Amino acid sequence: MSSTVTAIDFENKPAEVLLVGFGAVGIIYAYLLESKKLARVTCLARAKKYIRLQERGIDIHSKKWGVITGWRPHRVVQSLEEVLDSSFDYCIVSTKAVPEVLTTPALLGPLLTDRYHHPQPAYVLLQNGLGVEADLYSALKGRYDEPTVISCALYIMTNVTAEGNVSHGTFERILVGIYKEDPSIPDSPAQEQAMHTLVKLVTKSGSEASVTPNIAADKFRKNLWNASVGMISSLLGLSPSECACDENALDTAMAIVHEMMTELMVVARAIGYDESLIPSNTPDSIVMETRTKLRGTDFVPSALLDVRLGIPFELEVILGYPLREAQARQLSTPVCISTLILIPGS
């Protein structure tokens, strides 16, 4: 069946949302979308999380909303096989993008087959990293005329705690745009509608979201933080807040972070992201914000959490992707390459 997005009058009828990826980011956005009853969220949760939801729900400790005790989404399933009889306006994918372990098309499996008889939803990728949309877009493009894949630059501080609950900071914000293989092709009316309706859903739920004219550039700009601060934290085994306990250690870490971003800014310019898209002072701004905003918080970059747990993390899409872009253009990135080689598990 063709990929279509119909008009959603969510103020009178909640939007139907499928969430794949029940980690901290997924939980926050599922809670957010349901908080004003503008959406009904069906969450894919496996094993321990499914049992946890059935028994007592999830506690969210937020500096923005306070403490939400025992939260549960509208519906919880253990397999996408269980939703083949359901129609969705959106499918939000908030898993960590580790394509060398599991691709997004493989993850979504049943939804991309003839067994799913409903129109395809608009796919929203709440994932860090670059190029994370390509495999899903290609899989959908092979079956449908023009799929709707909404790419997001995500700004949020949230972690799953040791107890299985969620900690959340003071804000969350997304920039959204339609992913296409050829950015020069204008968005279709259905894509525009799906994108703008998503922004309305998020903003009317009390969060921040906006459409950006160049989502690829905004993703690259956001990735500067993940590729530098996130990766150096993983290399050192320390969060920015833990580094801040020693000013000399923090100064050294931030100097390396700045140099990594300086190298990646050269890549950005070579790709075509000019001053209007990614200002030259972006590395300075990121270092300053990291020093001030993360000092004294309990936030841990997700890559560092994964390194501590010994599980695969987003090294490929966060650092590997821009370094391949650099290599293709014969650009020198010695600090970034050294970091890539030295990070545990790389």
Image (tube, grey):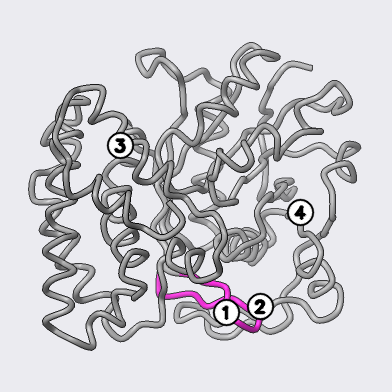
Query: Which residue position is annotated with label 1?
Result: 161
Per the model, the C-alpha gap separating discs 2 and 3 is 33 Å
Q: What residue is rendered at 26% in x and 45% in y?
A: 221
Q: Earlier in the sequence, mark 4 or mark 1?
A: 4
> Which one is in front in this view, the residue at disc 4 or the one at disc 3?
3
Figure quadrant of residue 191: top right
Quick one: 21 or 14, which is closer to the camera?
21
Q: Quadrant of the N terminus?
A: top right
Query: Which residue position is annotated with label 4?
Result: 44
Query: Which residue position is annotated with label 3?
Result: 322
> Which one is in front in this view, the residue at disc 2 or the one at disc 3?
3
Figure quadrant of residue 9: top right
Per the model, the C-alpha gap separating discs 4 and 1 is 19 Å
Give the amino acid at mark 4: Leu
Taken as a whole, is the magenta stretch helix, strand or loop? strand
> Which one is in front in this view, the residue at disc 2 or the one at disc 4?
2
Q: Quick one: SS at disc 3?
A: helix
Q: Are marks 2 and 1 in contact (CB under 8 Å)?
A: yes
Q: Quick one: SS at disc 4?
A: strand
Q: Earlier in the sequence, mark 4 or mark 3?
A: 4
Q: What residue is rendered at 23% in x and 69% in y?
A: 290
Give the amino acid at mark 1: Thr
Residue 164 numbered mark, or none: 2
> Which one is in front in this view, the residue at disc 1 or the one at disc 3?
3
